[in-house]
Image (cartoon, rainbow, N blue to C red):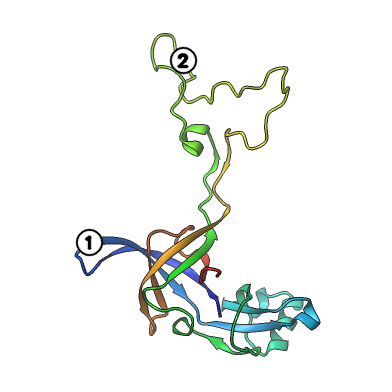
């Protein structure tokens, strides 16, 4: 299995063998249960769908309840698909943390960044502001300034750095080193930060070859 679903517990720090203090993130990863096995003949591609986190039956739609019942598993809160697996899986199989990851390897973590709402260019893009704070300046210090649109091209180019929605987007952080695996607690400690708030759902997967 190339990856698993988990959630972000929080950040802490660990000391390396050289005595360096390393910032790290604690993730609760798995156990995940196989809810569906897709094949190229039936579905057009090969993948394994896994579920993470229990979900109340009365909070589950009838369609999804039938989906879980067919797999013979309890309703799950989050689902994800993984392809490129080596061994065969069947619906109902449980995949644990230690079955997938090892200490010392590098992983990618996919999550949703914290939503910051509508922000200006100073906070969103790190602009320095326009001009000085004195000599007649009134309310232009944090303004974006000219955007270069005149009669030619008579429009604003797509991707122009301007004020707008910040955060709340899917982010992938690659090449995070696995510092420690606590199998009994189901915890995975990676070096560095991962997107999302505490308790946010993340997908931890091995880098694609």
Label 1, label 2: how far apart the Cα atoms are:
47 Å
Q: Earlier in the sequence, mark 1 or mark 2?
A: 1
Helix, strand or loop status at disc 2: loop
Residue at left offset 67%, top offset 90%: 72
Label 2 CA crowd tier, 10 Å (few <14, some 14–19, many 20+):
few
Q: Position of residue 82 (x, y in %)?
A: 62, 75
Q: Mark 1 — residue?
A: 20
Report which residue position mark 2 lands on.
Answer: 138
Screen quadrant of the C terminus: bottom right
Q: Which residue is pictured at 55% across the width and 76% down the height?
A: 2
Rendered position, 109 above or below 53: above
Q: Secondary structure at mark 1?
A: loop
Return the x and y of residue 129 as percentages of the image width and height: 45, 25
Determine the residue positioned at 76% across, 78% down: 62
Q: Which mark is residue 10?
A: none
Q: Is residue 61 above or below residue 125?
A: below
**Residue 15 position by quadrant:** bottom left
Asked whether the viewer can see residue 56, the reply is no
Specify whether 116 is left or right of 180. right
Which residue is the extreme one toward the top? 135
Q: Give the side of residue 23 with respect to residue 97, left or right.
A: left
Residue 161, quarter of picture: top right
Q: Is residue 107 left or right of residue 84?
A: left
Q: Position of residue 9 (x, y in %)?
A: 42, 67
């Amino acid at each position: 299995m190339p990856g698993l679903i988990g959630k972000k517990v929080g950040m802490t720090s660990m000391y390396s063998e050289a005595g360096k203090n390393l910032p790290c993130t604690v993730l609760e990863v798995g156990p995940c249960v196989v809810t569906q096995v897709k094949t190229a003949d039936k579905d057009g591609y090969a993948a394994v769908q896994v579920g993470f986190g229990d979900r109340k039956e009365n909070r589950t739609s009838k369609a999804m309840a039938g989906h879980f019942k067919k797999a013979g598993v309890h309703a799950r809160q989050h689902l994800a698909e993984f392809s490129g697996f080596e061994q065969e899986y069947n619906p109902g199989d449980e995949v644990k943390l230690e079955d997938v990851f090892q200490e010392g390897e590098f992983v990618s973590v996919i999550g949703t960044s914290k939503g910051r709402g509508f922000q200006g260019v100073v906070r969103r893009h790190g602009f320095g502001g326009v001009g000085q704070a004195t000599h007649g300046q009134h309310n232009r210090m944090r303004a974006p300034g000219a955007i270069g649109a005149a009669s030619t091209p008579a429009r604003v180019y797509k991707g122009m750095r301007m004020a707008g929605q910040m955060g709340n987007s899917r982010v992938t952080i690659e090449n995070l080193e696995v510092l420690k695996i606590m199998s009994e607690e189901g915890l995975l400690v990676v070096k560095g930060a991962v997107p999302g708030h505490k308790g946010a759902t993340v997908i931890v997967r091995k880098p694609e070859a």
